[in-house]
Image (cartoon, rainbow, N blue to C red):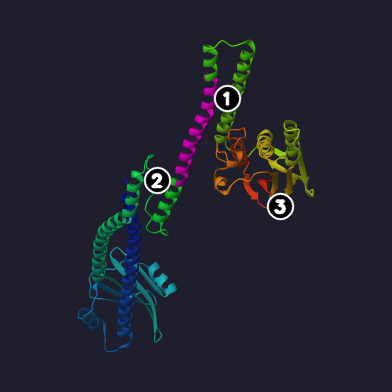
């Protein structure tokens, strides 16, 4: 069962339930109204009969029976009984059908003054009378045949109108839902046309403010992200192939040269040294690719232990300084926070050290030889680490692709590397819910990388 049919059925069921409740209330209220109205007519009949018998001296029992018999608005199967204060029957109407009564009923009427109830099809009213010092009890009964017929006609009308309303509601709801789903069908048709080879196509958005428009907009945004992912993946494969092809080609060329030429011992040593260097490059590139793939498939771990950022920076600076002994790395430690827990963040120590190490090594490699500045600042919700080096600035056109694998900016010409260091650092920091940004300081000719790490009390 598709969604449009389910929606039409659900709407019909809701309307059916509402109509059923409304019709049931109408029927119940009308039934109560008719019963109260008939009880009132019985009370009036009982009062009139009692007053004629007690107050009008010219009217005796026989005349009263004659009046009852010829009354135009007489009730069907009507019966009126009048008792004196000692519960003795003093009057009975001309109807031969006896009304069942007991002394307990008469006592109940004396106590309540007015009693009404139903016995089988008959409605009965009992009234305690006190007219001109004449006390008595009047019991009147009749069958509301006309009222029941009207109530039955009302029931037939309600049932018929209920069925007609259900059929009409089902038809209207089906065609309405079908019309509502037309834009969704068009969106589905456009989506089915989009394949991996046609990711540049987009779903048409006619109204950005309705639900279909919001759905189409969200789908288009997802397509944008997918297209970027495909482009990045394609670019990654192309760059990886290119980077692997160069050392492999060098290895093949060197081996072929050695096979076709007679070389001296020293020449063989130089050849083996060259092959060893190319082999190390291949191992380094392969390790970097494996590391990047590992971090791309890793999810953030909320159970990571707290890590002291200042200790992490000290250790990273020390190791980087050993790799670049001619480069000076200065650490600028701003005001110590009152709570040392602000220096902590949840994370994996070695991963963060790898990210910081990549950034510091890049600062040394692409700097102009001047000092590298590492600054640590504590904010209320996060910790900021800034790494600054002086050198050739990265152009604005290169900044959006700075953290993509294998991307190398224009300032990396004649510099050894594969373009993976920043990509690895960026992914590691993402795992730690941190941000990595770059900005160029044109005044001081400095490259500035800024890291925002949430701390445990943020």
Q: Which residue is mark 1?
A: 282
Could you tell me which quadrant the N terminus lies in?
top left
Dot placed on the residue nearer the N-terminal end, 1 or 3 = 1
Q: For mark 3, does the 10 Å Cα neighbourhood hold few (<14), some (14 to 19), or many (20 or more) residues?
A: few
**Which residue is denoted by mark 2 in the rendering?**
200
How many marks overall? Answer: 3
Q: Residues within 10 Å of mark 1 (few under 14, many from 20)?
A: some
Q: Is residue 294 above or below residue 431?
A: above
Tag 3 residue: 380
Vertical placement of residue 143 versus 49, above or below: above
Label 3 to label 2: alpha-carbon separation? 43 Å
**Residue 58 visible (yes or no):** yes
Q: Residue drawn at (72%, 35%), measured in percent from left and top? A: 316
Is residue 408 left or right of 458 when viewed as pictured? Answer: left
Question: For this view, does 367 lie left or right of residue 103?
Answer: right
The CA span between labels 1 and 3 is 45 Å
- Residue 128 in percent (x, y) is at 39, 77
- The boundaries of the magenta stretch are 224-252
Among numbered discs 3 and 2, the one appearing first in the sequence:
2
In contact (CB < 8 Å): disc 3 and disc 2:
no
SS at mark 2 in the image? loop
Frontmost residue, 91 versus 33: 33
Mark 3 or 2, closer to the camera? 2
Q: Quadrant of residue 196?
A: top left
């Amino acid at each position: 069962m598709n969604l449009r049919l389910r929606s039409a059925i659900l709407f019909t069921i809701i309307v059916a339930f509402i109509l059923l409740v409304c019709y049931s209330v109408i029927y119940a209220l009308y039934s109560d109204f008719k019963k109260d109205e008939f009880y009132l007519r019985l009370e009036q009949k009982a009062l009139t009969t009692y007053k004629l018998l007690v107050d009008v001296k010219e009217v005796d029992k026989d005349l009263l029976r004659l009046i009852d018999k010829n009354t135009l608005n007489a009730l069907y199967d009507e019966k009126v009984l009048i008792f004196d204060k000692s519960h003795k029957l003093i009057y009975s109407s001309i109807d031969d059908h006896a009304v069942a009564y007991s002394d307990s009923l008469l006592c109940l009427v004396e106590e309540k003054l007015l009693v009404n109830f139903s016995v089988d099809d008959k409605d009965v009213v009992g009234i305690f009378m006190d007219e001109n010092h004449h006390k008595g009890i009047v019991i009147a009964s009749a069958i509301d045949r006309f009222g029941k017929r009207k109530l039955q006609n009302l029931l037939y009308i309600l049932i018929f109108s209920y069925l007609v309303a259900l059929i009409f509601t089902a038809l209207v709801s089906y065609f309405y839902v079908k019309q509502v789903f037309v834009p969704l069908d068009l969106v589905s048709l456009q989506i089915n046309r989009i394949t991996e080879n046609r990711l540049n196509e987009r779903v048409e958005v006619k109204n950005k403010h309705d639900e279909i428009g919001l759905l189409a907009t969200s789908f288009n945004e997802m397509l944008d992200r997918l297209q970027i992912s495909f482009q990045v993946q394609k670019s990654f494969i192309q760059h990886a192939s290119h980077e692997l092809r160069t050392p492999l080609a060098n290895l093949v060329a060197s081996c072929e040269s050695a096979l076709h030429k007679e070389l001296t011992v020293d020449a063989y040593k130089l050849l083996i040294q060259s092959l060893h260097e190319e082999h190390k490059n291949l191992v380094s590139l392969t390790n970097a690719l494996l590391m990047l793939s590992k971090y791309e498939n890793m999810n953030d771990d909320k159970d990571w232990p707290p890590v002291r950022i200042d200790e992490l920076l000290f250790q990273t600076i020390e190791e980087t300084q050993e790799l670049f002994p001619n480069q000076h790395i200065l650490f600028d430690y701003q005001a110590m926070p009152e709570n040392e827990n602000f220096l902590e963040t949840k994370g994996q120590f070695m991963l963060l050290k790898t990210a910081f190490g990549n950034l510091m090594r890049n600062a040394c490699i692409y700097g102009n030889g001047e000092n590298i500045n590492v600054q640590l600042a504590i904010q209320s919700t996060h910790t900021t680490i800034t790494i600054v080096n002086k050198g050739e600035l990265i152009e604005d056109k290169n900044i959006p692709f700075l953290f993509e694998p294998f991307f190398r900016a224009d300032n990396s010409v004649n510099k050894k590397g594969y373009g993976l260091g920043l990509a690895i650092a960026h992914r590691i920091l993402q795992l730690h819910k941190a941000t990595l940004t770059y900005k160029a300081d044109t005044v001081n000719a400095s490259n500035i990388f800024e890291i925002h790490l949430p701390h445990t009390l943020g």
